[in-house]
Image (cartoon, rainbow, N blue to C red):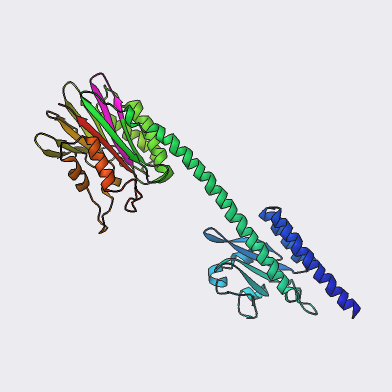
Amino acid sequence: MAKTLGERHRISSFKLHALLSITQAINENLSVEELLARYRSLLEEDLKIGKILIYKFDEKKWECLLYWGLEEEVSRTIDVERDLLKYAEITTLTSAGENLAQHFDIVIPVYKTTNPIAYVLIGDIEEGEGVSPVIKHLPFVQTLSNIIMVAIENIRMFNELLRQEALKKELELASRMQNMLIPKNDTLPRNNHIQVTSFYHPHYEVGGDYYDCIRLSRDEVGFCIADVSGKGISAALLMSNFQANLRALFSHEISLTALVERLNERVMNSANGEKFITLFVAKYNYRTRELNFVNAGHNPPVLYHKESRKLVFLRSGCVGIGMLDEIPFIHHGSMLIEEPSKMICYTDGLVEVIDDTGVGFGTAVIEENIANDAPVAENINSIIESRRILSGSTAIFDDITILGIEFYA
């Protein structure tokens, strides 16, 4: 009797010490591998439990986290969704016809709130006399399994938090770098011939929109607006590469047709046809008042002649940049600005802003705000305010860029 009581006391002391040791290991921020090694040692060496298999849900899928005492092939025959999700509480496997029962005695599901995060399967190597170690120590094994699995899940979530924080800082840096590539309003041309105003509003930290304005000669200025298909980092990287290429190629000497062809080659080499860029690019000569342009699949800018009260959409061009290895044809647009006029170029994020009925506003918002004698800068501000672009409108789901040009006669 004394021996039995002593043995019980020894086992109780061991379990208490084991739980304390595991708790300290967790507090010491040991790695997942180290925690699993201690867990395995306790079950295998101290409790004489012969087989264990652990499946852990890791972000998107179930993975085998640990196995011993059995062939690896056994783990491959088990499908968590098919074989284990049905167990919502600790279960003794008694069905002789069940695949799991051929290898294991107990299934221990581990939950965090209402979601299963792990399944622990344990069993003895072989049947022996007396109570099996699995059954004898089941409450302790269940407690230990829950502690270990929840700790490992917390480690995963903490690492994911660190990863997201690092990504956030990288995005903030990328955003600052991208903003350096976007011309500021006070650097845009403002003289007796032309005045350029811009608005740039990426939906996320980095965007796929781009605009630029480049002095090509004493009498000529070039400007463009562009939009990469898709969103996020990949779109921003492609746009940064595009900006460098456009700046290197855009000059007084090169024709717009040749410029678009060269840009298409470089985008195809960079994106391999996986993304494309819509582009409106133009040259304006102060002396001749001639506006030349190519619209490569972009939303047509709206040109308003103040005296004749005419609205013109600039559509002449070709398919988007990077859609085809070679652009089959390019229609070059040309017109004289013979009276005071103004133009609004924009990306599709503006016309896709939805109204209360869930329908996009389209170009109506631009036509309504440009058809007047007010400066184009005021027109742009009116668009921004009327569509609550800077006040947290939930109707916005893309980058929005606006480029306004005032032509003086």
* Residue nearest the viewer, comparing 145 with 274: 145
Is 102 contained in the magenta span? no
Which residues are drawn in magenta? 213-227
Residue at 67 percent across and 62 percent down: it is 148
* Residue nearest the viewer, comparing 329 with 340: 340
How far across and down, in percent of the image, does residue 241 sit? 40, 34
Majority SS type along the magenta span: strand
Task: Work out whether 250 lies above or below 101.
Answer: above
* Residue nearest the viewer, comparing 181 with 258: 181
Q: Residue furthest right?
A: 2
Left/right of residue 225 with respect to residue 83 in the rendered view? left
How far across and down, in percent of the image, does residue 153 sit? 60, 59
Left/right of residue 47 with respect to residue 90 in the rendered view? right
Task: Work out whether 66 lies above or below 382.
Answer: below
Left/right of residue 327 with respect to residue 30 in the rendered view? left
Which quadrant is the C terminus positioned in? Answer: top left
How far across and down, in percent of the image, does residue 267 sit? 36, 36
